[in-house]
Image: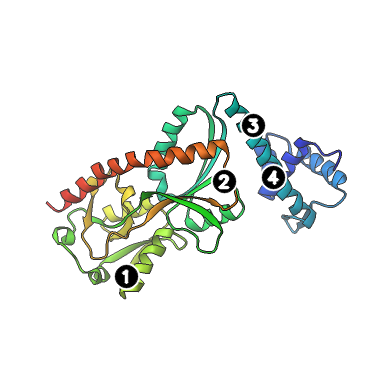
Amino acid sequence: MNQATLHQLKVFEAAARHSSFTRAAEELFLTQPTVSMQIKQLTKSVGLPLFEQVGKRLYLTEAGRELFATCRQIFDNIAQFEMKVADLKGLKQGQLKLAVITTAKYFIPRLLGKFCELYPGIDISLQVTNHEQILERMSQNLDDLYIMSQIPENMDITCQPFLENPLIVFAPLNHPLSQEKNIPIERLAEEPFIMREPGSGTRRAVQSLFDEQGVKVRVKLELGSNEAIKQAIVGGLGISVLSRHTLLLDSSQFSILDVQHFPIHRNWYMVYPSGKQLSIVARAYYDYLLAAAKDIVEQNATYSYSAVEATHR
């Protein structure tokens, strides 16, 4: 490994992460022959094969997996050093890598914008995905912080609640039940129901409540995004349960049903693997988000509660 260069390690890390020389070349703005040459030279330096090809797929060898883990540590340490130097100079710069659950897209981008105004030297990488993919990313330690509303049970993590995330029953505007109070939860079984896709944290929470109460709803549609569900509700295809945060800015199109056992009380959490040392940038965003959550609560009160009152007038 004496002859291995940092550039070769960067090329290898990208190829290993994508399982593709072609995608690594695209990410690094290199030609594929250049990537192949760098990997070949690195393999010679290591003295063992780093990749093996089975059919059309590229896999890491045991030596490749060890080197991939080492590369991650090296690049994390370099990033930490660069940010510490910047901090010592009185600057905040570097990269913040966030992975957030789908529903968090309704408020996290707004907070990122304000954060970037405070620290214009910070580059943001934001991944928006479902619960299962968040867990997969966390297991690979791909990001600095994870924003989610369902804490994983079988992972060693550190988590901090920062905001409530109540789940409420959405219905089309002027739905027959919109004027009723304290609706029995069993009544939902008579309505066509729109459910999030398997793997969604919202679906798990809703299904857990229905199982607990012995309610079996008629699932008419399964959709993979909150926006698709909201459009289906507006179109009169059924009712659904969504986070109150999804109601921001378009509350006039929905009725919020007053159903027993709702809202389902949940929280938003900032999560990261236990033992992980947060970068200076990640710690700055962590502290910022705790403070900024108060503003979100006030905005939700303005949009959401006024909307609920309007649907019952």
> Which numbered tag is attached to residue 218?
1
- Determine whether, in the image, residue 68 is placed left or right of residue 290: right
Q: Is residue 287 above or below residue 17?
A: above
Q: CA distance from mark 4 to mark 1?
A: 49 Å
Tell which circle, 3 or 2, labels the residue nearer the N-terminal end.
Answer: 3
The 10 Å Cα crowd at callout 4, few under 14, some 14 to 19, many 20 or more, is: few
Q: In 3D space, how far apart are the residues under numbered discs 4 and 2 (Cα atoms)? A: 13 Å
Mark 4 / mark 3, whichever is N-terminal: 4
Q: Residue at x 53, y 31 (%)?
A: 122
State if disc 2 and disc 3 touch (CB < 8 Å): no
* Mark 4 and mark 3: Cα distance apart in space: 14 Å
Amino acid type for the residue under numbered disc 1: Arg
| Marks 1 and 3 close (CB-CB < 8 Å) | no
Amino acid type at circle 3 is Glu
For the N terminus, give its image quadrant. top right
Instruction: Out of 234 and 99, give the one closest to the viewer.
Output: 99
Query: Which labelled disc corresponds to residue 143?
Result: 2
* Residue 246 percent location from the top left of the image: 33, 48
- Could you tell which of marks 4 and 2 lies nearer the N-terminus? 4
Q: Which mark is residue 73?
A: 4
N-term-proximal mark, 2 vs 1:
2
Is 308 positioned to the left or the right of 32 in the image? left
